[in-house]
Image (cartoon, rainbow, N blue to C red):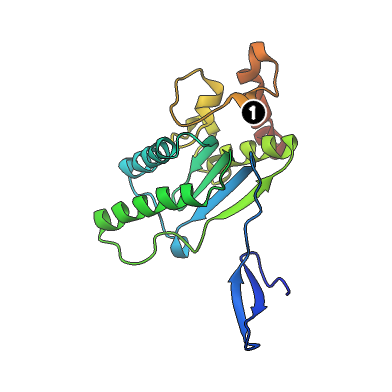
Amino acid sequence: MCITGKNYNEDYNKKGELIMTRKKREWYQEAKLHVIARGNHRSDIFKDKTDYELYLNYLQEANEYYDYKYHIVAYTLMTNHIHLIIETEDKDISDFIKRVHSRYAWNFNKKYNYIGHLFQDRYRSELIDTDKYLLESSRYIHLNPVKAKMVELPEDYEWSSYNQYIIITKDRIVECDKILSYFKKDNCRELYKKFVESSIISHTL
C-alpha cells in the first residue's frame, strides 16, 4: 500500500484491481483536533448574520445531543470556510461534525435554493499533540480574519471565539479554561491577548 494523498490510499481488491480507500483519521481518546471545512469549490457557506448564528446553534445542539462528550476549545467562522479546535472524550469527531454539517447544509440549501454539496469533500482534521501546537493553533485561527484583511484586530471579528478569551463572558459553546491555564491565573486573559496580537505586531515590523 502506498499513500497517494492526504485523504486516500491505494489498495487492491481480491481480483487485483486498483481501488481507492479513504485513510483512517488519526485519533485517540481525549485527542485535540484542528478541524477545517471549506465550501465546495471555495463557495461561500455563510451569506448573512443568521447563517453564522444557525451554525453556532447547531454546534451547541450537537454538543447537547452527545452529552457534552466534545469540548469546543476555539472556533472561527470565515465566509467560505470554518476552523474549529475540538477536544474529544471517548469518541472521534466524525459523528459530531456530520450532524452539524448535514443539518446546516440542509437548511442552507433550502434557504438559498442551492443544489449540490455545500461543503468540499470531507472536512480535514489535524491532530494537536503538544501544548505548544494547541496554543499556536488557537492563535492561528483567531488571527484568520486579520490575515484575510477583514478586520484590523481579532477582537473586531464577530464570528470567532476570541472575545470569549479576552473578556469574561458566559459562553455556552466555547471552553476557554484549557488554553487560559497556560497563563498566570490573575491576568490570563490579558496575557492571552498579548500572545495572540504579538503576531500581528511582528508581521508589521
Residue at 65% over, 40% down: 137
Quick check: 99 left or right of 14? left
129 sits left or right of 103 in the view: right
Task: Name the residue: 62% across, 57% down.
Answer: 25
- Front residue (pair 68, 55): 68
For the residue pair 49 and 117, the one nearer the viewer reads as: 117
Q: Image height check: is 21 above or below 100? A: below
Dot 1 surroundings within 10 Å: few (below 14), some, or many (20 or more)? Answer: some
SS assignment at label 1? helix
**Is any atom of residue 153 visible in this view?**
no
Q: Residue at x 71, y 71 (%)?
A: 3
| 103 w.r.t. 156: above or below | below
Q: Residue at x 64, y 30 (%)?
A: 197
Q: Quadrant of residue 198?
A: top right
Q: Which residue is mark 1?
A: 179
Vertical position of residue 205 compared to residue 16: above or below: above
The spot of residue 188 in percent (x, y) is: 64, 18
Quadrant assignment for the N terminus = bottom right
Give coordinates of residue 106: x percent, y percent.
31, 55
Q: Position of residue 60 (x, y in %)?
A: 41, 36
Asked if residue 196 lies left or right of residue 73, the reply is right
Q: Is residue 136 visible?
A: yes
